[in-house]
Image: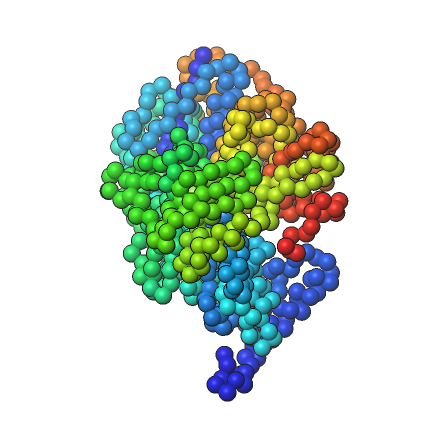
């Protein structure tokens, strides 16, 4: 992009795209229409379709692309934080807008109008559907594949379709790219089998947290090579674990990085040991649940591949704050509300497991808010893959709201929750929140479990009441 | 009294919350004091004789090939015989397609079905995704469709219903699903039965009448079911 003499040769199309993007971002902010995390990129992409390739070419330390169904926002935030603490200037599509336009928005915000990028490394969280395009446009140095679950099938089509499109993109990469995979997920091992890119595998080894039975939300229990049912020496979350196939002999490959000695501390935090070629390190972090142990392990593995020292990794993660909406606590009308985003069966099961772990049932009143807008998935059939049967014991009241609150109430009834414990509240989240808070004793704690757009709406309601700051300022 | 529910390929064919359908039949039996026993019938398992209500859900492409193979021969014949004898059956999406004569993919050999329903399905160029509302002999039914298969009913086959909102069997003839005696197949999931208790109770009652022709179900309080049905109907009308 720069000539030897230092004079910049300006790419007029790129400059126009960046100017238009900036103008869009400014207008959106002036109108007070929220974060503007995707429209500026959409405008820029229309003007210069090659904008992402041009801007990533200016990165000194390349791009890291994070994909997978669950935990990609949390994991990419962890990676970006670690790189920042390590002294890198990082571009990151942090607000969770992970389509190509969201990535372009993040880059355009960090570029001068002549196309000079003010960062050395990028952390790009990619949507499942956008992944092949993101890989093609950015030629990443490191790719992290977290896991593959059924998620919002109405948007993506079936899992098999995603696997085929990802494989096509990954086959174009050579050994200059490192692909970090969760080897506990048999579909990722199959997906990356025989690629030219360098592979680094991570997984868990901790008998304390093995599941006794396969949860209902499991999708990938067939061997991806021969079709036979898989056996598990240990199963941790959904279909993730130490798998093997008795029929064809395939099994979880040797791990390069292993997570063990995991200490889960309720809804607060966790600690774990990460063990690999660079030695063993203990991580303490303020995010809860076994699914976050996977996220931590993924982030640490990527950071090590990127050459960050262990001490820096541990320091950065100790200071990590929960990503928008995943788990957070707010104080409102003298109640502590714990909000946990729920967006698919696997994530929801892990949240339920975490909330009921201590006592075998819920310990506080709980509000579940289900919407069916595009970003939530318009198809609510996924509620039937969540193990709400975990909520049947106990006597704490359950409240439902959101556009599909009635589906949720019905689901709880069929899960064996007595109808008298289920209170349907109005669809309107402001009204529902008001009635829910009134029903919780003053000074107490209550849980709220919203889908994505319900979380956005609740945040807006709470922000209007002075309870939380708006997320894009984080 | 007891109802035995046979869940065909439950592990492999459970893509759109299908287990909700099985749970609904079982719970609605239990709430009436009828014991409910759910048996998963997997690949290689023989078809038990005592099934009153069969359920067959949807699956991913990879699973569907193995399941189609397993149904060929004696197992498929026994399933057809059970339905001819009065066992109730609900098949959705992939299960529905495999109970027709044949499924014709774009780029592979046709998958043979067992012809329990007189219909054929071919892979279509677009995916039909969205809320569905149909008029049927069980009243208005609500669900969600997500399929690219185009299903064509044989002459004289009674559809499950007439599409009011959505695309249905093929997006052309206004039909959704098919009925063959005590068997019903369709594309609507959601899960289907929890929001459509009239259909759930018809399956349960039909299955139990095979043994006791005078059997009648007692009524239940369907407040939650009716509310969920009303929301789904409203969403279908306003957002497709």
- Camera-nearest residue between B217 and B164: B217
- Camera-nearest residue between A181 and A127: A181
Residue B170 in view here: no
Looking at the rendering, in which quadrant would you find the C terminus of chain B? top right
* Residue pictured at 50% horizontal, 41% vertical: A270
- Camera-nearest residue between A109 and A14: A109
Q: Please give the count of numbered marks on the rendered protein.
A: 0
Q: How far across and down, in percent of the image, does residue A16 sit?
A: 60, 75
Say which quarter of the image contains residue A395: top right
- Camera-nearest residue between A250 and B42: A250
Q: Residue furthest bottom?
A: A5
* Residue pictured at 34% horizontal, 65% vertical: A174
Above or below for A404 versus A418: below
* Residue pictured at 61% horizontal, 20% vertical: B221
Residue A466 in view here: yes
Looking at the rendering, in which quadrant would you find the N terminus of chain B? top left
Q: Is residue A147 left or right of residue A38?
A: left
Q: Residue furthest left?
A: A248
Q: How far across and down, in percent of the image, does residue A248 sit?
A: 24, 42
* Residue pictured at 49% horizontal, 84% vertical: A3
Above or below for A26 versus B153: below
Q: How far across and down, in percent of the image, does residue A1 sit?
A: 50, 79
Q: Residue furthest front?
A: A311
Q: How far across and down, in percent of the image, does residue B91 sit?
A: 43, 33
């Amino acid at each position: 992009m720069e000539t030897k003499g230092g004079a910049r040769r300006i790419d007029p199309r790129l400059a126009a795209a960046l100017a238009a993007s900036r103008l869009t971002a400014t207008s959106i902010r002036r109108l007070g229409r929220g974060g503007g995390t995707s429209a500026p990129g959409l405008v820029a992409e229309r003007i210069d379709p090659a904008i992402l390739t041009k801007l990533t070419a200016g990165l000194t330390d390349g791009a890291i692309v994070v994909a997978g169904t669950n935990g990609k926002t949390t994991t990419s935030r962890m990676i970006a934080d670690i790189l920042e603490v390590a002294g890198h200037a990082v571009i990151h599509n942090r607000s969770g807008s992970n389509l190509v336009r969201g990535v372009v928005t993040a880059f355009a915000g960090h570029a001068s109008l002549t196309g000079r990028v003010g960062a050395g490394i990028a952390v790009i969280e990619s949507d499942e559907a956008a992944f092949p395009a993101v890989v093609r446009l950015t030629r990443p140095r490191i790719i992290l594949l977290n896991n593959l679950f059924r998620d919002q099938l109405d948007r993506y089509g079936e899992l098999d379709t995603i696997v085929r499109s990802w494989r096509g993109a990954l086959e174009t990469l050579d050994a200059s790219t490192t692909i970090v995979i969760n080897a506990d997920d048999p579909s990722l091992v199959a997906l990356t089998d025989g690629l030219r890119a360098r592979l680094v595998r991570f997984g868990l080894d901790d008998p304390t947290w093995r599941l006794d039975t396969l949860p209902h939300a499991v999708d990938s229990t067939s061997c991806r090579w021969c079709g036979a049912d898989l056996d598990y020496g240990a199963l941790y979350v959904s279909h993730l674990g130490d798998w093997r196939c008795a029929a064809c002999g395939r099994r979880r490959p040797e791990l390069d990085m292993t997570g063990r000695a995991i200490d889960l501390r309720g809804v607060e935090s966790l600690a774990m040991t990460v063990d690999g070629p660079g030695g063993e390190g203990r991580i303490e972090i303020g995010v809860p649940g076994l699914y976050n142990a996977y996220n931590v392990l993924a982030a640490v593995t990527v950071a090590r591949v990127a050459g960050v020292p262990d001490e820096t990794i541990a320091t950065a993660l100790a200071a990590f704050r929960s990503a928008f909406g995943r788990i957070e606590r707010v104080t409102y009308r003298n109640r502590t509300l714990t909000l946990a985003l729920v967006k698919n069966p696997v994530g929801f099961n892990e949240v339920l497991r975490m909330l009921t772990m201590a006592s075998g049932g819920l310990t506080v009143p709980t509000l579940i808010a289900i919407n069916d807008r595009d970003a939530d998935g318009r198809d609510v059939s996924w509620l039937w893959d969540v193990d709400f049967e975990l909520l049947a014991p106990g006597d704490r009241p359950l409240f439902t709201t959101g556009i599909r609150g009635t589906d949720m109430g019905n689901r709880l009834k069929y899960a064996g929750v007595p109808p008298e414990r289920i209170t349907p509240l109005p669809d309107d989240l402001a009204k529902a929140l008001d009635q829910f808070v009134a029903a919780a004793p003053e000074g107490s704690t209550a849980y709220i479990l919203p889908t994505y757009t319900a979380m956005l709406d609740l945040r807006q309601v709470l922000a209007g009441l002075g309870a939380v700051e708006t997320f894009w300022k984080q | 009294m007891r109802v035995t529910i046979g869940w065909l390929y439950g592990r492999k064919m459970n893509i759109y919350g299908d287990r909700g359908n099985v749970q609904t039949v079982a719970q609605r039996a239990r709430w009436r004091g009828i014991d409910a026993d759910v048996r998963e019938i997997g690949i290689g398992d023989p078809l038990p004789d005592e099934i009153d209500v069969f359920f067959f859900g949807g699956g991913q492409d990879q699973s569907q090939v193995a399941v189609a193979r397993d149904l060929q021969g004696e197992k498929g014949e026994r399933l057809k015989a059970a339905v001819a004898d009065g066992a109730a059956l609900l098949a959705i999406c992939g299960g529905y397609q495999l109970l027709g004569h044949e499924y014709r993919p774009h780029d592979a050999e046709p998958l043979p079905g067992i012809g329990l329903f007189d219909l054929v399905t071919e892979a279509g160029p677009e995916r039909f995704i969205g809320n569905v509302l149909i008029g049927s002999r069980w009243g208005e039914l609500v669900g969600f469709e997500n399929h690219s298969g185009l299903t064509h009913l044989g002459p004289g086959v009674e559809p499950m219903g007439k599409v009011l909102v959505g695309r249905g069997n093929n997006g052309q003839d206004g039909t959704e699903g098919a009925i063959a005696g005590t068997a019903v197949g369709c594309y609507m999931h959601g899960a289907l039965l929890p929001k459509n208790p009239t259909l759930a109770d018809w399956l349960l009652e039909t299955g139990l009448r095979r043994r006791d022709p005078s059997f009648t179900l007692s009524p239940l309080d369907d407040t939650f079911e009716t509310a969920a049905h009303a929301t789904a109907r409203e969403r279908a009308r306003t957002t497709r």
